[in-house]
Image: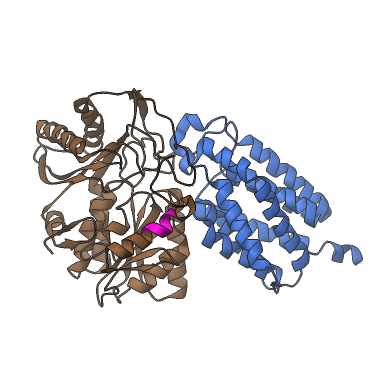
Chain colours: A blue, B brown
Amino acid sequence: MTDTLGSHLGVAELSRWIHDFARLISENKDYLTALDSAIGDADHGINMDRGMTAVVAGLDGVQPSSPGDLFKHVGMTLVSSVGGASGPLFGTFFLRVAAGCGDKAVIEPAVFAAALRSGLDGVVARGKAEAGDKTMYDALEPAVSKLEGSVQSGRSLAEGLREACAAAESGRDATIPLLARKGRASYLGERSVGHQDPGATTVALLFESAVKTLG
Amino acid sequence: MKKLINDPANVVKEALLGIEAAHPDLRIDHANKIIFRGDAPRRGKVGLISGGGSGHEPLHGGFVGLGMLDAACAGEVFTSPVPAQMLEATKRVDGGAGVLHIVKNYTGDVMNFEMAAEMAAAETGVSVVSVVTDDDVAVQDSLYTAGRRGVGVTVLLEKIAGAAAEAGASLADVASIAKKVNANGRSMGLALTSCTVPAAGKPTFELSEQEMEVGIGIHGEPGRQRLPLEPASQIAARLVEPILNDLPYQRGDAVIAFVNGMGGTPLLELYLMYHEVDRILKGHGVTVARSLVGSYITSLEMAGCSVTLLRVDDETLRLWDAPVKTPALRWGA
């Protein structure tokens, strides 16, 4: 019983995740922007940092009532402060995760994995990306699938998140040789080959943070 | 970087203050960065809103007024505005007949407008129809890219659909006229120099004194090819021929011919280019019914131009000729 409770996620743990992710984005702001200047419009780090700074500022002194409430705040803030393509994509991701959490006060690992799957579905519905298009999907899909599989086969949440993070990182690295088929990078055609996708990089940071704070 | 600015972070905000001061017949919502027609909402008239990243002026704010847009949402430079802006604009221009969203085909713009339309459907009773412009023939492989970009046709569409709305057409009719304009319009652009986003402080791309980028996008996106600089007569052919080949033209077809400056090219050169374009069109037996020459959809201080041809029928021409009164286009009113 204690063991099961120990892997349940409440507002406190999930808030730590969001704060840590915001810190990682801020630390990697220039790196993400440099990746984006090679194949996009050189603002991914700046825009994500502006969004996550707003998310953290909005949480200051406010205790969300549930994990769903927390993720809804994250999603709404990203949608209204990031702009470009990242705002709707990462915003939709967190809004769908929020819907997947419902109004439960704590969520068990299987519900968490299913909520992340809803988030992924939201990203696909919004961005129409498919595997291999050189987008955030290429890191997010393997990470979510890995976490689901791990949780279903009874491994701990910590173990599942470590596997998910490794999958996100390989997915991120695998975007380097790809030809971009979505977003502004797609106008480069062959010239997009050889560059790592900034959105997939941000997804890997999200899972790196999850390992640290939720595992 | 030499620019007439105070602080790179405040460029859009401070430009809106200037628009407000210069055009008392417009209303500015500074918090939401929206430019409204002074008398919006007009009871019973379809509302037209557009918006996009800043840096393309006069698009879109300079086209707010009688016979064109009811509101324009300004994003940061070259960054799409956010859904909350379009939602607010939609609510405030609806006069009961619904609202048309005019969206240029860029990944960010399309998604942010899409979210705004979903929010409008969930939170308000306002009917919203979206029309996406995608007229840039420089993007050849639209199956494996984000698709053709929305460029010059957006200006012509905002004028023509705006006239239809002013004349009392329904939302469905205004949308179908807008779609007809997009379907019959094609554009191609060219850069002689790069541009500098104020917040970035350095040129978006490098182009030497001897080079030109053919097929440039309005944010400095790469075009079809980078070539040694040529005389205007040859450049005109590089811009007009791909357009004529893309939409099968027949002898006797009538067009609105639009030669647009990218921001850093003088009108003297644009008229010189217009002559070259006109000469090529005559050679193909294409009749120029109306013309537009000037900088209307720009890319900050980029030097260069784009050519847009819109094939027209009598209805489109009548709407083009209808009165318009905006900061950047104004006739008959």
- Vertical relation: A70 (above or below) B135: below
Question: Which portion, as a residue range, is magenta?
Answer: B11-15
- Does residue B81 appear left or right of residue B240 in this picture? right
The question of residue B66 being in magenta is answered with: no
Residue B280 image offset from top left, x and y in percent: 14, 31
- Vertical relation: B110 (above or below) B45: above
- Does residue A180 appear left or right of residue B162 in this picture? right
Residue A157 image offset from top left, x and y in percent: 81, 55
The question of residue B12 being in magenta is answered with: yes
Instruction: Using the rendered view, name the quadrant where residue B95 is placed.
Output: bottom left
Instruction: Using the rendered view, name the quadrant where residue B250 is placed.
Output: top left
Residue B63 image offset from top left, x and y in percent: 27, 58
The residue shown at (66%, 62%) is: A56
Residue B304 image offset from top left, x and y in percent: 29, 36
Front residue of B162/A103: it is: B162
- Does residue A16 appear left or right of residue B281 in this picture? right
Locate the N terminus of chain B and report the quarter of the image it occupies. top left
Q: Is residue A134 visible?
A: no
Front residue of A156/B190: it is: B190
Locate the C terminus of chain B and report the quarter of the image it occupies. bottom left
The residue shown at (86%, 63%) is: A6
Q: Main secondary structure of the magenta part?
A: helix
- Does residue B158 appear left or right of residue B203 in this picture? left
The residue shown at (81%, 54%) is: A215
Front residue of B155/A49: it is: A49
The residue shown at (17%, 58%) is: B330
Q: Is residue B282 visible?
A: yes
